[in-house]
Image (tube, helix red, strand yellow):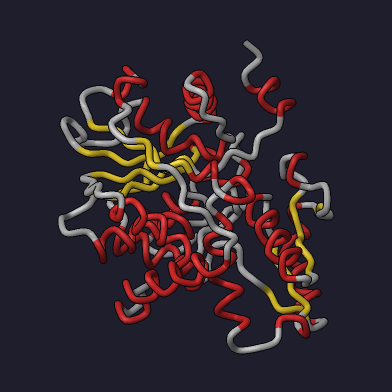
């Protein structure tokens, strides 16, 4: 992929203007210098960007709003049969936007998705996901990709601009990674807007390491089986556009175990931060000393989602 096809800073800034005008996206808190609250992180300056407090409970609404606002500028969405495929948080943001705008659409969701995401969304066996989507597209539905979409990634990149606008110039940024849309947007945002070099790390579950394998293979890969407690980080393939951005802007993909993700969830919960497993992966990498060269550095960790039910908390954190 040529450099010209990668996100530009103007695209991310324009996305920020759309998000602000929409009234659907909030500026999430940035907890500053909180390393003393987490003694296991070591000697670093820790900042937490709390996207678990975002509208619909995750960062996804940033991308959804920019995706649809850009689309609405070229066509009448009320005449479109909108369709997506999602394990949960994108589907929730997709439904929220459509509800606010009085639009209708369909979301195809795998049976592995958490129960608290599926009240209004029909589930489908994983092997039937893509055939179901392909059939609906052949029937005239407009497919909205949940991670491998340029406008979506530009919306996610606004998260990076908010951190910089808050006066924080990080040395290191740690972001969870599923298909790669969030880390692509954030990494592009920091690399294009920061006044100093920033190392951005993507974090994946060991059992759902499609971006890690893509980086090893030199192209976006698909896996026949993905499995993790972090369902939102477990798409069966990495996005091709996302891979191109990770190759250019991401320092390294780091793997963490499900046990480490749950441990991270427990640590955050003990400090009053409600985060779903998928939202804890980046913090797990910091707590388990997986991120290199952070001694004395300014480190921003993105807590990406808080859509976890009381029942799930009880199952995962029974103590």
Q: Position of residue 158 (x, y in %)?
A: 41, 61
Q: Residue at x 25, y 64 (%)?
A: 193
In the rendered view, does 33 fall on the left or right side of 242? left
Q: Residue at x 35, y 43 (%)?
A: 174
Q: Position of residue 88 (x, y in %)?
A: 68, 50
Q: Position of residue 40 (x, y in %)?
A: 33, 19
- Determine the image quadrant of residue 140: bottom right
Q: In this rendering, is residue 275 above or below 1?
A: above
Q: In this rendering, is residue 199 above or below 286?
A: below
Q: Residue at x 83, y 53 (%)?
A: 120
Residue found at the far top of this picture? 319
Q: In this rendering, is residue 93 above or below 30?
A: below
Q: In this rendering, is residue 138 above or below 257?
A: below
Q: Depth check: 95 or 172 in front?
A: 95
Q: Residue at x 23, y 36 (%)?
A: 292
- Image quarter in which the N terminus is found: bottom left
Q: Depth check: 300 or 210 in front?
A: 300
Residue found at the far bottom of this picture? 74
């Amino acid at each position: 992929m040529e450099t010209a096809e990668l996100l530009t800073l103007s695209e991310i800034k324009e996305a920020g203007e759309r998000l602000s005008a929409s009234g659907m996206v909030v500026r999430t808190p940035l907890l500053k210098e909180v390393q003393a609250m987490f003694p296991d992180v070591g000697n670093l300056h820790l900042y937490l960007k709390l996207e678990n407090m975002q509208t619909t409970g995750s960062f996804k609404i940033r991308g959804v709003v920019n995706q649809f606002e850009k689309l609405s500028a070229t066509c009448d969405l009320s005449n479109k049969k909108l369709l997506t495929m999602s394990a949960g948080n994108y589907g929730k943001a997709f439904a929220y936007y459509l509800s606010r705008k009085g639009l209708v659409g369909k979301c195809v969701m795998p049976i592995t998705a958490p129960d608290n995401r599926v009240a209004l969304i029909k589930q489908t066996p994983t092997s039937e996901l893509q055939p179901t989507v392909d059939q609906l597209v052949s029937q005239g539905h407009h497919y909205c990709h949940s991670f491998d979409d340029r406008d979506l990634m530009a919306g996610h990149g606004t998260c990076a601009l908010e951190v910089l606008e808050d006066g924080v110039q990080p040395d290191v940024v740690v972001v969870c990674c599923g298909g790669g849309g969030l880390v692509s947007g954030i990494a592009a945002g920091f690399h294009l807007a920061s006044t100093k070099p920033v190392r951005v790390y993507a974090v994946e579950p060991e059992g759902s390491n499609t971006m890690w394998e893509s980086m090893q293979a030199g192209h976006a890969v698909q896996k026949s089986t993905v499995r993790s407690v972090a369902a939102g980080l477990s798409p069966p393939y990495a996005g091709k556009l996302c891979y191109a951005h990770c190759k250019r802007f991401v320092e390294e993909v780091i793997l963490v175990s499900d046990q480490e993700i749950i441990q991270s969830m427990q640590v955050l919960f003990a400090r009053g931060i409600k985060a779903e497993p998928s939202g804890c992966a980046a913090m797990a990498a910091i707590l388990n000393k997986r991120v290199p060269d952070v001694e004395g550095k300014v480190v921003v960790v993105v807590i990406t989602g808080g859509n976890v039910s009381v029942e799930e908390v009880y199952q995962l954190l029974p103590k």
